């Protein structure tokens, strides 16, 4: 089951929609990679992550992002703690060692994929020999 995300063609937004499940799963994975990337660099919290994703062309509600964060924590990719932010308390997330390993592996796979996708954009190479009917 996906996390109810899609990316619209007009604004590049992620929101609940009736997009095909394949796209839902793809864009959900992009969001998870963004989260892991930022949590590896510094502690993150939900609202700031939502704002960062908006800058990247996605739109998520707290009701979508927080289950993603909790799921990543349950899988051992993130760890969280409550910290004081003024008079309020905020839950911040950091990448775990397992999360850092997963991110490194994902980066390698993304590089490989981007190489393949870029190669597909090259003009087709003419074949030698007789033309096919």
Image (cartoon, rainbow, N blue to C red):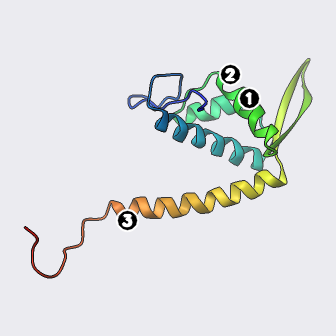
Find residue 61 and report its horizontal and vertical position in percent. Answer: 63, 21
Q: Would residue 3 appear left or right of 75 to someone viewing this image?
A: left
In the rendered image, the quadrant that contains the N terminus is top right
Earlier residue among tags 3 and 1: 1
In the rendered image, the quadrant that contains the C terminus is bottom left
Look at mark 3 in the image and give the residue it sits on: 119
Q: Would residue 28 appear left or right of 8 to someone viewing this image?
A: right
The residue carrying pointer 2 sits among few (fewer than 14), some (14 to 19) or many (20 or more) residues within 10 Å by Cα, namely few
Find residue 62 and report its horizontal and vertical position in percent. Answer: 68, 22
| Secondary structure type for disc 2 | helix
Q: Residue at x 76, y 49 (%)?
A: 40
| Nearer to me, 81 or 18 | 18
C-alpha span from label 3 to label 2: 37 Å
Numbered tag placed on residue 62 in the rendering: 2
Q: Residue at x 72, y 55 (%)?
A: 102
Q: Is residue 55 above or below residue 88?
A: below
Look at mark 1 in the image and give the residue it sits on: 46
C-alpha span from label 3 to label 1: 37 Å
């Amino acid at each position: 089951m996906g996390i109810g995300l899609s990316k619209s063609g007009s604004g590049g937004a992620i929101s609940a929609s009736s997009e095909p499940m394949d796209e839902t799963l793809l864009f959900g994975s992009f969001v998870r990679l963004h989260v892991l990337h930022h949590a590896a660099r510094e502690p993150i919290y939900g609202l700031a992550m939502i704002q960062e994703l908006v800058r990247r062309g996605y739109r998520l509600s707290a009701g979508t992002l927080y289950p993603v964060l909790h799921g990543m924590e349950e899988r051992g990719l993130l760890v969280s703690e409550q910290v004081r932010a003024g008079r309020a308390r905020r839950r911040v997330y950091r990448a775990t060692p397992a999360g850092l390993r997963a991110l490194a592996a994902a980066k390698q796979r993304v590089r490989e994929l981007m190489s393949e996708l870029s190669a597909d954009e090259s003009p087709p190479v003419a074949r030698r020999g007789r033309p096919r009917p």
